[in-house]
Image: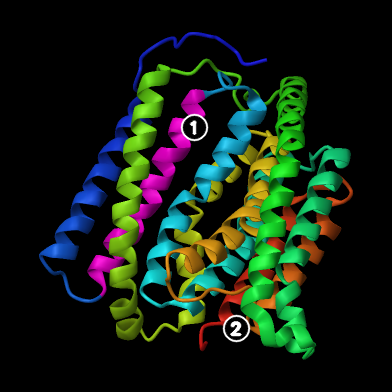
Amino acid sequence: MPTTTAPTGPTFIRSDYVVLGAGGLAVLLAGVTRFAGGGEVLPFLASAVAVTLLASLVGRCVEQLGDRFGPGATGVLQSALGNLPELFIALFALKAGLVGVVQAALIGSILANLLLVLGLAFLVGGLRHGTQKLNSERARSIIVLMVLSVAAMVVPSLAHYVHTPAAAHEKTLSLIVSVVLLVLFALTLPASLRKGAGASRQAGTGDSAGGGEGAGHSEAPRWPVWLAVGLLAVAAAAAAFVSDWFVVALEPAMDALNISDAFAGLVIVAIAGNAIENVVGVQLAARNQSEYAFSIVINSPIQIALVLAPLLVVLSAVFGFATLTLVFAPMLVVSVVIAVILTAFITFDGESTWIEGAALIAVYALIATSFWWG
């Protein structure tokens, strides 16, 4: 049941002021460099930092909502809002005709979560606490859903590269696959809410027994609901504007730094758009809340495959933007298959170690390097 614990203690602490102050300054600097001029690289860097800090503020607002909407709903909400900056960036990029960047960013977001963020969480948590438990039954169910959703997302790519008759209808096939994935997400949402509630309770029991710092939302929120929701709305609105500035500055920066579309989407856009998972997942693993960290990190690629990618395909057709299909470049398909298989093998035993985290990070670095030239 949702907790009704009232906010206690000071409303804002030092880290809150840091996030709010740094976020405001970053947005201001991004706006100044966008409209007053700042060369080719500075506007891009300023807007990238602003997007990351706004994503961090979104995550903090959701954290301060605590379990007042229920732990399951809070977990799903955090995963969904974690992809909000990326949704804005992708829509503006499609409007600008940067289809290659968007496709690379979608796959890059999955790779960043499965390899980089999960690897960092395993590495930091393992070095601080040794072998961490992931709840093997829940880990297997999440991994199975992830494998199925990513497999469905790359079906149009397989049809294209094996030259089936469907290859001549890739736009229609992509739309059909997108609708099916969105329906699948709607069907799995109630189960995700129930599992989210169970996971939080289990995490709380395990962490308390293990001497951790408490479960995912064990501390009473400091912000009242109206403040958390209000700041969440402001951060989301600011993210929409900054995402537009980010995309406008992206092409000149890519030309100036000699960065390919594939690398920009796979690494830069993906990491900037997944700042919440980057920060929250590692923090929770460092506090020995490994199950909760794993749930947040893995839920993001599931939502990318089931919601973000198909939604962008549908919206690109509805709004008349550059046509986005689910036919990805061969190397992107191979990379995401490698990431899914490695993650499934590593997590299926319900445990994580620091060496597994280091290996995941190494694979991510190699894949990212292979896209530097395009």
Q: Which residue is mark 2?
A: 370
Question: In this rendering, is residue 231 above or below 116?
Answer: above
Residue 19 appears in view? no
Report whether residue 258 is seen: yes
Along the line of sight, the residue nearer the viewer: 178 or 365: 178
Residue 332 falls left or right of residue 84: right
Q: Secondary structure at mark 1?
A: helix
Callout 1 amino acid? Val
Which x, y percent locates residue 177? Answer: 70, 65
Q: Name the residue: 29% across, 70% down.
A: 248
- Pick the residue in front: 286 or 192: 192
Image disc number at residue 62: 1
Picture quadrant where residue 138 is located: top right
- Residue type at mark 2 is Ser
Q: Is 357 left, or right, of 280 in this rendering?
A: right
Number of the front mark, 1 or 2: 1
Q: Which residues are magenta?
A: 41-65
> Disc 2 on helix, strand or loop?
helix
- Left or right side of 190 for 315: left
Instruction: Assess whether residue 45 is covered by the magenta stretch.
Output: yes
Position in image of residue 261 (x %, y %): 46, 81
N-terminal label among 1 and 2 = 1
Number of marks drawn: 2
* Magenta-drawn stretch contains 312: no
Colour scheme shown: rainbow
In which quadrant will I find the N terminus?
A: top right
